[in-house]
Amino acid sequence: MSAEIFDKVKSVLAEIETSNPQSPEEVEQFRITYLGSKNKIKPLFGEIRHIPNEQKKEFGQLVNTVKQAAEDKFQALKSASEAAQDQVDLGSIDLTAPGEPINIGSRHPVSITLNKIIDIFTRIGFNVAEDREIEDDWHNFTAMNTPEDHPARDMQDTFYLKDSTEMLLRTHTSSVQARWMTKNKPPIRIIAPGRVYRNETISARSHCQFHQVEGLYVDKNVSFADMKQTLLYFAQEMYGAETKIRLRPSFFPFTEPSAEMDVSCFICDAKGCSVCKYTGWVEILGCGMIDPEVLKNCGIDPDEYTGFAFGMGIERQAMMLYQINDIRLLFENDVRFLNQFKSAW
Ligand code: DAH
């Protein structure tokens, strides 16, 4: 009788040792059979009742061996199956595929345009000069030959600091001319980029804030011809070697004579299109010979020195370069718009 029971236990042990579950389902079935709550080994312990006392120890050890064998095998199967699972996951990943690109954004079209302008002028000896956006009345208006009662002030209404008639957000980068000339002696060759403000209703063509680049050249014997040649060089570098320029008489309080400069329309090759309003020309900047009054205001002797100055809106150049039809797009920071300039820098 006891030999039969021993055989039964040994056959369970053999069963465990020879079983070969593969799939996760088969491994789970193995666990249920030998280690689950109604497992095959549990009842074997009960058989000890039928074993003579002198064999009880041996029998107990044998059943424990079976239990241990089941636990060891299950652990081994589990590790093997997890490793296999990992293999499958790795197999489904292409480790040679390039990583997800990190979106580093793109330069703003105003920055791209400004960088182009800076690049062009620094190549012919201009330095970049930056100054404050919160300006006083003198540097923004009075020094630039626009005294308090001058009608030209009406065209550049701006934002004044609270309770102040003296401090304002600059209306143009021309204020940097006054800042620079009072502190430096000629020869002076600078361009001054920066943000400017006007009290204007926001529309597709104008905004209460925008950017300008000012140019200033003061030395002995600087002539109108120097200005024209400098601006022609700029226009051809910026808009193409075939670009022509035209200077139209104009008025600015700080230059005499003053002019507005047009470039031949590079969109339609001056044949006429909506950008040039079918004239073949587009206006891009204001310029002129520095008024002797301005030189005097800034402590430079107009009998010894002459100079020219010019100023242009950067948004305007950017809108023409990239054919952007609404200035507000440049301030809204809509990534669908900005992403279009990824390849431009
Ligand atoms: N400051 C002028 C404006 O904002 C632009 C300008 C015109 C600047 C002629 C100049 C200049 O330096 O000479 O409209």
Image (cartoon, rainbow, N blue to C red):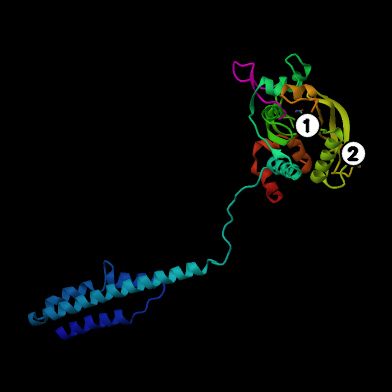
Residue behind mark 1 = 309
Q: Is mark 1 within 8 Å of ligand 1?
A: yes
Residue 85 shows in this picture: yes
The front one of 182 and 160 is: 182
Nearer-N-terminus badge (2/1)? 2
Is 217 colored magenta in this rendering?
no
User: Label 2 vs label 1: CA separation?
Assistant: 25 Å
The nearer-to-camera label among 2 and 1 is: 1
Q: Residues within 10 Å of mark 2 (few under 14, many from 20)?
A: many
**35 to the left or right of 220:** left
Hey, which residue is sitting farthest front in the picture? Answer: 304
Residue behind mark 2 = 280
Location of residue 330 in the rendering, given as x and y in whole percent from the top left corner: 69, 37
> The magenta stretch spans which residues?
158-174
Number of marks drawn: 2
The front one of 7 and 164 is: 164
Q: Residues within 10 Å of mark 1 (few under 14, many from 20)?
A: many
Q: Quadrant of residue 118?
A: top right
Q: Quadrant of residue 158?
A: top right
Location of residue 311 in the rendering, given as x and y in whole percent from the top left corner: 76, 32
Judge whether 2 appears above or below 308 on screen. Answer: below
Location of residue 214 in the rendering, given as x and y in whole percent from the top left corner: 74, 33
Hey, which residue is sitting farthest bottom in the picture? Answer: 3
Which amino acid does the dot numbered 2 rest on? Gly
- The local secondary structure at tag 1 comes to strand
Location of residue 238 in the rendering, given as x and y in whole percent from the top left corner: 79, 44
